[in-house]
Image (cartoon, rainbow, N blue to C red):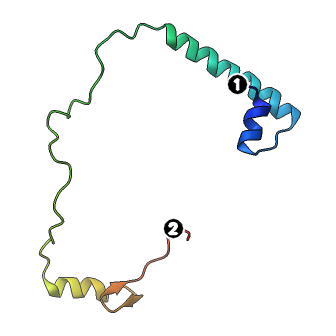
C-alpha cells in the first residue's frame, strides 16, 4: 500500500518530502518484518515466571477499617470538600 493511500485513509495531509521519507521508513519496516518471518520460531512459547503463582487477580472490595475519627481528620485537611466528599482537579476532559 502506498503512503498516499495510507495518508488518505488516515485523513492527514503530507508534503512531498514527508511522503518520500515515510515511504523509505515504511519500506524499511516491512523489510524487517520479512526478516522476522524467516527467523526460526519453533521454540517453546515464553511465559511469565509468576503465571503459576497467580490465582484470582480480582479481590473483594473490603473497607480498610479505618477509624471514623481518622477518616474525618483526613477529610478535614482538604481545602475543597462537599460533605464527606473531597474535591480534586479534573484529570479527564469531558
Secondary structure beneath label 1: helix
Q: Is residue 54 left or right of residue 86?
A: left
**Residue at x 81%, y 34% (from the top left corner):** 18
Separation of marks 2 and 1 at Cα, in angstroms: 34 Å
Q: Within the image, what quadrant is residue 4 found in?
A: top right
| Image disc number at residue 25 | 1
Q: Within the image, what quadrant is residue 59 found in?
A: bottom left
Quarter of the image containing the C terminus?
A: bottom right
**Residue at x 56%, y 17% (from the top left corner):** 33
Disc nearer the start of the sequence (2/1)? 1
Tell me residue 73's x, y (percent). Answer: 24, 87
Q: Is residue 28 left or right of residue 45?
A: right
**Residue at x 33%, y 92% (from the top left corner):** 83
Q: Nearer the viewer, residue 48 or 42?
A: 42
Secondary structure beneath label 2: loop
Q: How many marks do you count on the picture?
A: 2
Residue 20's place in the image compared with 10, above or below, is above
Tell me residue 84's x, y (percent). Answer: 30, 88
Q: Within the image, what quadrant is residue 69 found in?
A: bottom left
Residues at marks 2 and 1 touching, judged by CB atoms closer than 8 Å: no
**Residue at x 71%, y 43% (from the top left corner):** 10
Mark 2 nearby-residue class (10 Å; few <14, some 14–19, many ≥20): few
Q: What residue did someone put label 2 on?
A: 92
Tell me residue 90's x, y (percent). Answer: 50, 74
Amino acid at each position: 500500500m502506498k503512503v498516499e493511500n495510507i495518508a488518505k485513509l488516515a485523513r492527514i495531509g503530507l508534503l512531498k518530502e514527508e511522503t518520500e521519507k515515510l515511504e523509505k521508513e515504511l519500506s524499511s519496516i516491512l523489510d524487517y518484518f520479512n526478516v522476522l518471518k524467516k527467523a526460526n520460531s519453533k521454540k517453546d512459547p515464553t511465559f511469565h515466571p509468576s503465571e503459576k503463582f497467580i490465582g484470582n487477580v480480582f479481590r473483594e472490595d473490603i473497607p480498610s477499617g479505618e477509624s471514623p475519627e481518622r477518616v474525618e481528620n483526613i477529610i478535614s485537611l482538604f481545602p475543597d470538600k462537599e460533605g464527606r466528599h473531597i474535591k480534586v482537579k479534573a484529570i479527564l476532559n469531558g
